[in-house]
Amino acid sequence: MASPPRLSLAEAASALGVHYQTAYRWVRAGVLPAVKVTGAYEVEAAAVDSLRRARAAPVPPPVRRRVRSWVPMVERVLAGLAEGDEQRVRELLDDLVGSGVSLLEVCDRVLAPALAEIGGRWSTGELSVAGEHRASAICERAIGRWTTPPPGRPRGVAVVCSPPAEGHHLPGHMATAVLRSLRWRVHHLGVGVPLPDIRRLADAEDADLVVLSVVWPPAVEEAHEAAERLGPARRVLVGGPARPLAELVAAVSPDPATEPGGWPAPAGREAARGG
């Protein structure tokens, strides 16, 4: 009985329209069955054809989860943050993102109120500095898993950072994640960046947008002064306490109504919390 026809892995990759390394990863993951013959992978032609048809089959869009009330989710995430239960927090947030809830909504509707309560508990002495820092670090690591930009041409180049007087890292991480989810190429510089360095890097990267992330009230005025000196060659958005990231989305979107959770920005000076 004749053996079924086989293709080399390079031939299989060509037939599937993917790079050789992609086909290799599929073999390693068991997606594309293969056998090794004298040190090289070979794939049955039928398996390649089956995978090609499966990849070409139409896939219905994911059903977006409708959240009737954000309060229970905020309370569960808050409990996990206060107790330092990172696994619980990740599972709750991953469930939201995986069910179609936009990253913007996760940040604005869940993380922001939970972290505000964490800050309140710290200010009253109910939570220690260590506990507050632990909660922030958990959120930073969770957000870091979602900062891979989606495929497609970048909408523009942005620089996200904080001026010297601001020491909070998390708002900048949140703004970076949301901008990347909207296909912006983002250079995230962190906190305490001198103004001349911000300007030089923005010039070197030909940035369309600079976002100064501030949440500490004394740092807000410094950020606005920095914005005046960074402009008008490029757009500069300044954050501030209690400003939702939705304002950032509205400010950078050609049509905010088309963006996930893209609510209209309020009148007045352009700003975005953590933006």
Image (cartoon, helix red, strand yellow):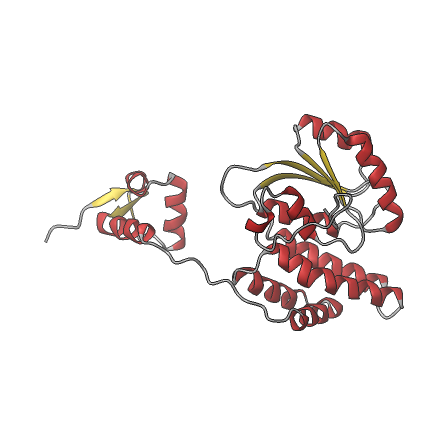
- Residue 172's x, y, as percent? 72, 47
Q: Is residue 155 above or below residue 74?
A: above
- Residue 47's x, y, as percent? 26, 52
Name the one closer to the observer, 2 or 176: 176
Specify whether 233 is left or right of 106.
Answer: right
Name the one closer to the observer, 156 or 256: 256
Residue extending farthest to the front is 267
Q: Residue at x 69, y 54 (%)?
A: 140
- Residue 131's x, y, as percent? 80, 64
Name the one closer to the observer, 254 or 115: 254
Specify whether 169 is left or right of 101.
Answer: right
Question: Is there any visible trace of residue 151 in the rendered image?
Answer: yes
Specify whether 6 is left or right of 55.
Answer: left
Q: Residue at x 64, y 42 (%)?
A: 252
Question: Is there any visible trace of residue 176 in the rendered image?
Answer: no
Q: Residue at x 86, y 45 (%)?
A: 219
Name the one closer to the observer, 218 or 270: 270
- Residue 227's x, y, as percent? 80, 36
